[in-house]
Amino acid sequence: MKVIRILFITHSISLYGATRSLLDLASELSRLGHQLFFFIPQEGSLKERHELTDLLDKIGVRYAFLPYCPSVHRKNEGDFWLRELRRTMNTRCLEEMEDYVGKWKIDIIHTNSLTHMIGARLSQRVKIPHVWHIREALKKDFGLLYDSRLQYKYALLKTQRIICISEYVKKIHRRMLFGAHEIKIYNGFNIDHYRLDGAFERNPEKFTIIICGSIQESKGQLDAVKAVEYLICRRGMKHICLKIVGDYSNEYGREIQRYIEIHQLGPYIEMIAFQSDLRELRRQADIALMCSRSEGFGRVTVESMLSENVVIGADCAGTAEIIRNGVNGYVYESGDICDLGEKIYDVITNWGDQEKIIKNAKAYAVLNFNIKDYAKKICEVYWEILSQKGN
């Protein structure tokens, strides 16, 4: 088998879902013998850099930190001169990228997020095939807009293959992807890393509920808080604890903290700073919530299934593609606090019935989202592109 030399262009040094998914893929591709290289944006803290590079060193990846920028902006950051500054910085960075591509003898360029267009531009300059991974709903998830919609459309049309992580992501971007070569491939997981055993056997007297992910309005952490309040006030349920895990230093995080304080929910809710490894927290949890209204795929959902947490998720977006209500988890009507509260109540008061749900969920995750099958599908994309190129 020919070794493929793959250059991954990352969009962030933070170890949230998209970067975690890429690292899982990189680890398996490296195990298969392929050679991997990373471009990483010059951003973030030294601690974040060290956490990421430690993982890359373990995989055996070569990498370079370079000053490239996203090609998207928030609605209130759409000033023309700022867009031009980002474009100019990326143009200058492309020259340095070209030197690395030549030195590393790259076969495939793989961009890990729609937020960055520089991989597509690099591909066109060096005449090397480009794969573009779309993992997010830019506007719905993050309130992001394209710096230039026309340039993005052109770049997507010129990309050899676009990988969408769910049917939902394909649907959200259908207008931009019209005429492009897009396919759907669900994320894969290192099953052994995320799998935990024995959760159901705890038979807890106090139930721990967990919600993980970036703290932002679209993720719905405040819905989870209000659902706990509903359970306490309407159902008299006091033997519960909600753990909210993520960076809550932003305005939405402060809004959640204020709500907890005003409504005297402190004894029932704990806010925990972002952690790159959630296994111990998941080991302590009984129920995992996915309250996002626009989840591209649902990485947290699959991790929860592998960890033997009963998953309750919003019946929308990518989450609805994973959870089968009453089979491998439960769904509630997105945004309906009472429905979410009642679903949690039903799970807790019928805990003896959850063993089958937990086992179904774990088996489903192992069968459908294992890293070996995922890496095989990605490699098939690479081989198809390279065979068309004549390599």
Image: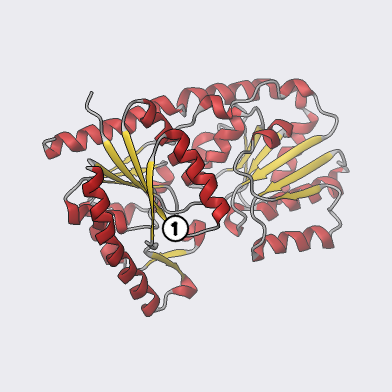
* Quarter the C terminus occupies: top left
Give residue 172's position: percent from left, percent from top: 40, 52
Residue 15 makes an appearance in the image: no
Residue under pointer 1: 138
| Residue at 41% from the left image edge and 41% from the top image edge | 165
Q: How many marks?
A: 1
Q: Indicate the quadrant containing the N terminus: top left, top right, bottom left or bottom right.
A: top left
Q: Residue drawn 42% across and 53% down?
A: 11
- The answer to whether 102 is drawn above or below residue 217 in the figure is above
At 67% across and 57% down in the image, what residue appears? Answer: 248
- The reply, left or right, for residue 334 in relation to residue 177 is right
Front residue of this view, candidates 268 and 192: 192
- Front residue of this view, candidates 92 and 369: 92
Residue 370's x, y, as percent?
Answer: 46, 26
278 is higher (above) or lower (below) than 91 = above
Depth check: give the residue in front, 369 or 232. 369
Amino acid type of the residue tagged 1 in the rendering: Leu
Q: Residue at x 39, y 26 (%)?
A: 31
Q: Bin the neighbour count of mark 1 within 10 Å (Cα to Cα): few under 14, some 14-19, many 20 and up.
A: many
Left or right of 335, for residue 208: right
In the picture shown, does residue 16 fall above or below 93?
above
Q: Where is 173 relative to 275, above or below?
A: below
- Give percent across and percent down for residue 312: 64, 38
Q: Position of residue 83 (x, y in %)?
A: 37, 73
